[in-house]
Image: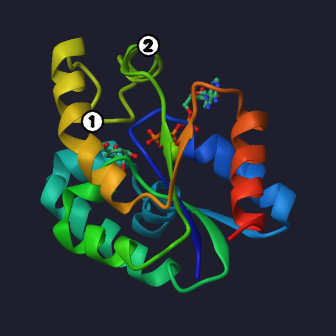
Amino acid sequence: MAIVLIGFMGAGKTTIGQALAGRLNKRFVDLDTYIEQREGRTIATIFSADGEDYFRQLEHEALRTWLPEDIIMATGGGIVEREENIHILNQNADTFWLNTDIEKLFVRISGDLSRPNAAEHTFSQIKELYNKRLSRYNEIAFMEVDSNKTVEECVELILTHLSHS
Ligand SMILES: Nc1ncnc2c1ncn2[C@@H]1O[C@H](COP(=O)(O)OP(=O)(O)OP(=O)(O)O)[C@@H](O)[C@H]1O
Ligand SMILES: O=C(O)C1=C[C@@H](O)[C@@H](O)[C@H](O)C1
Ligand SMILES: [Mg+2]
């Protein structure tokens, strides 16, 4: 079963996931990257050509494909948008929630056109989405990791938790 990183856009799932995979000598799979490679187009293009619901279906299928594998998985920030995904991830004990202050996240993600749910959104719109998702991340998290800390500190926290579980 995969070790899964969840959290809002920009919280560090890709960066911390890669570092964690290096430390555990496991394969790293980023669902966003996997979807883009499989589709042969970017997430922004998928959203604009086929809509968010279509992207959510691809994301759901990607989650089901990779969850049984012995990998480190970074999910997309919107993985909790589908009730079924919450259900599947709830069964998985090793789901780590990376949580960073929304003010910091906004600086990282605003204006980045590769994230259609952040690009050209105001701070209050992004904060509203973050607040809506908070309780869902919390619901499925095996452990919350304060990713205001450095990448190295976050990796150490996760490794310590895994070694005690
Ligand atoms: N703990 C951290 N401290 C400082 N900067 C960080 C930290 N984690 C990630 N970053 C930086 O924040 C940016 C966003 O990180 P990253 O792409 O890993 O987030 P993500 O959660 O994968 O985002 P998305 O959901 O959009 O895929 C990157 O520029 C990365 O270098
Ligand atoms: O939070 C979101 O809704 C998203 C986050 C990204 O990881 C991508 O999965 C996509 O841009 C949607
Ligand atoms: Mg990412």
Badge 1: residue crowd in 10 Å (few <14, some 14–19, many ≥20): some
Q: In which quarter of the image is ligand 1?
A: top right
Q: Is mark 2 on a helix, strand or loop?
A: helix
Indicate which disc, 1 or 2, sits on the residue closer to the N terminus.
2
Which of the two discs, 1 and 2, sits closer to the camera? 2
Q: What residue type is labelled 2?
A: Val
Q: Which residue is drawn at 39% across and 79% down?
A: 91
Mark 1, residue position: 116
Q: Is mark 1 on a helix, strand or loop?
A: loop
Mark 2, residue position: 107
When the figure is inspected, residue 142 is found, relative to residue 88, above or below; the finding is above
Q: What residue type is labelled 1?
A: Pro
Badge 2: residue crowd in 10 Å (few <14, some 14–19, many ≥20): few
The x, y position of residue 31, in whole percent, is 48, 62
Looking at the picture, tell me which residue is in the foreground, 149 or 27. Answer: 149
Q: Which residue is drawn at 71% across and 34% down?
A: 151
Q: Residue furthest front?
A: 164
